[in-house]
Amino acid sequence: MVNSEGLRAIDQFAANVGVDTGLLERAAVPDALAYGRANTPATDFTPLHDWSEREQWCLATGIYFEARGESYRGQVAVAQVIMNRVEDHRYPDTICGVVYQNQHRRNACQFSFACDGIPDRINEPAAWALAQEITQTVLNEDIYLTEVADATHYHATYVRPHWARNMDKLTQVGLHVFYRFKAGWLFG
């Protein structure tokens, strides 16, 4: 468990992160990379381990649309949930597969931005650059939040999803509450 001193260190690290202004360009991502989504900026990722540029883009997109208003720690926590799902046999084994799972089911997908019918536009270049930086940090395994170590679910504090009562609540980070599967419980 991260103590308050550790949390302050994470926030201090976040405050000192330099944003590469080259990442702020507003060029369109190729359709094959962006799942045909318009007006998304180009990425400038260096492939990490076995993660393709496309997979890195999907993680940054998930962070941006699910958590851009959260603290650095809150955005890392959301990224960690995505990665936990990639490692969980109940979910697709790719980042893009997890982020866009059931995107064809309006308001019934895994991450609401993927199926809410609202065009996904990157309108906050600094927030997009931070999402890309967090993607790099998480995929390089340079940061890990023990309080969401095995979390596979989260929701905003202002909603009460039906599945939450069947899971173990782990913690709250910002406006998101994080959960893991109860022992022996199979999802779906």
Image (tube, grey):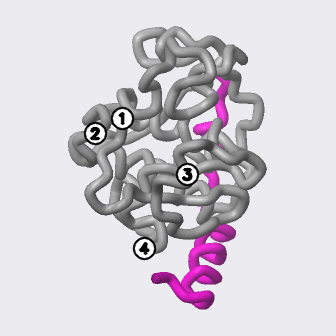
Q: Main secondary structure of the magenta part?
A: helix
Q: Earlier in the sequence, mark 2 or mark 3?
A: 2
Dot 1 lies on which element? loop
Q: Residue at x 69, y 45 (%)?
A: 127
Q: Which residue is mark 1?
A: 188
* Distance CA(mark 4)–CA(mark 3): 20 Å
Number of numbered markers: 4
Amino acid residing under circle 2: Arg
Q: CA distance from mark 1 to mark 3?
A: 14 Å
Q: Nearer the viewer, mark 2 or mark 4?
A: 2
Q: Choose mark 2 or mark 3, whichever is in front.
A: 3
Determine whether label 1 and label 4 are within 8 Å by CB: no
User: Which mark is on residue 35?
Assistant: none
Q: Earlier in the sequence, mark 2 or mark 4?
A: 2
Q: Is residue 172 above or below residue 94?
A: below
Mark 2–mark 3 Cα distance, whole angstroms, equals: 17 Å
Which disc is residue 164 wearing? Answer: 3
Q: CA distance from mark 1 to mark 4?
A: 26 Å
Circle 2 residue:
90
Bounds of the magenta span? 1-26
Q: Determine crowd level at label 1: few under 14, some 14-19, many 20+ residues with C-alpha closer than 10 A.
A: few
Q: Earlier in the sequence, mark 1 or mark 2?
A: 2
Q: Quadrant of the C terminus?
A: top left
Mark drawn on residue 146: 4
Q: From the top left corner, tell me how far across and down residue 41 is, in percent.
A: 61, 25
* Earlier-in-chain disc, 4 versus 3: 4
User: Where in the figure is residue 154, as x and y percent of width and height?
Assistant: 56, 51
